[in-house]
Structure formats: structure tokens, C-alpha cells
Amino acid sequence: QVQLVESGGGLVQPGGSLRLSCAASGSIFRINRIVVMSWYRQAPGKERELVASVTRGGDTNCADSVKERFTISRDNVKNMVYLQMNSLKSDDTAVYYCKASDSIDGNEYWGQGTQVTVSS
């Protein structure tokens, strides 16, 4: 199994920045099968949505709503994925989740989430 733990959330004023981190641990055999790691978010009353994803090779994809403001990155040695969030808006307020996808059996692993609140 693989465990994911997010950190870095908190309260920030509009226009501010936060950096989220996600640490993967557990079976090295299964961690090495993870090709895509992603950040999702879920705001109150809304469905969970994909924010950004990154492959083991470093290819990234970001939702249009955050493309100019958020950057996803990955450290394969440390088994970490990051989300740098700049120019935060109140609409970015949500619980942010890390997800890892097993490229062999299709298993999906989720973290417990970290709250990001953008408010003055």
C-alpha cells in the first residue's frame, strides 16, 4: 500500500502564496509504479476537481483556472509532490487532496486533505 500525507495548508490573504507538500510512503515496490501524481480540491458544496498533475518524467498539466498562478512539481527521490500557489483568490478556498495512481493495477491512493482558506 501507499500512504499520502499532505501539509502546508492554512489561512492566507488574497494575493498571497502557499506551498503544499505531499509525501508518499509505504511499499517502495508500489511507489515505483506510480507514474502520475495529482492535486485535487473540493470546495464546500462543490464536486472535487483536478487542479494539476505531474508525471514521473516531469510532464505537467494544470487546470485553466489556475494555470497562470499554480505550479506543480515532483521529487522522485524524496517521493514528494508540491503545489506552489501564488496570487491566491477567495475562489481557491477548498480542501486540497493529493492523489497517486498506480500505473499497473489502476489503484488510486488519496491523502487526507489539507485546508486552504483565502480570506482577508
Image: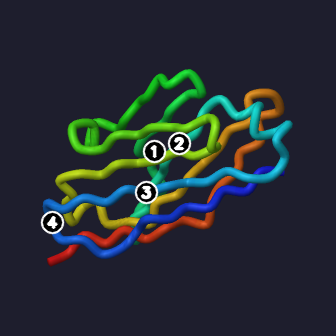
The disc labelled 4 sits on which kind of residue? Pro
Question: Where does residue 10 sit, x and y in percent of width and height?
Answer: 36, 73
Q: Earlier in the sequence, mark 4 or mark 1?
A: 4
Q: CA distance from mark 2 to mark 3?
A: 12 Å
Tell whether 14 sits left or right of 11.
Answer: left
Q: Earlier in the sequence, mark 2 or mark 4?
A: 4
Q: CA distance from mark 2 to mark 4?
A: 24 Å
Q: Which residue is mark 1?
A: 50
- SS for dot 4: loop
| Crowd rating for badge 4 (residues with CA inside 10 Å; few <14, some 14–19, many 20+) | some
Q: Earlier in the sequence, mark 1 or mark 2?
A: 2
Residue type at mark 3: give it: Leu
| Crowd tier of the residue under label 2, counting other residues whose Cα lies within 10 Å: few below 14, some 14–19, many 20 or above | many
Residue under pointer 4: 14
The amino acid beneath tag 2 is Ser
Classify 10 Å Cα crowding around label 3: few (below 14), some (14-19), many (20 and above). Answer: many
Cβ atoms at labels 1 and 2 below 8 Å apart: yes
- The dot on residue 13 is none
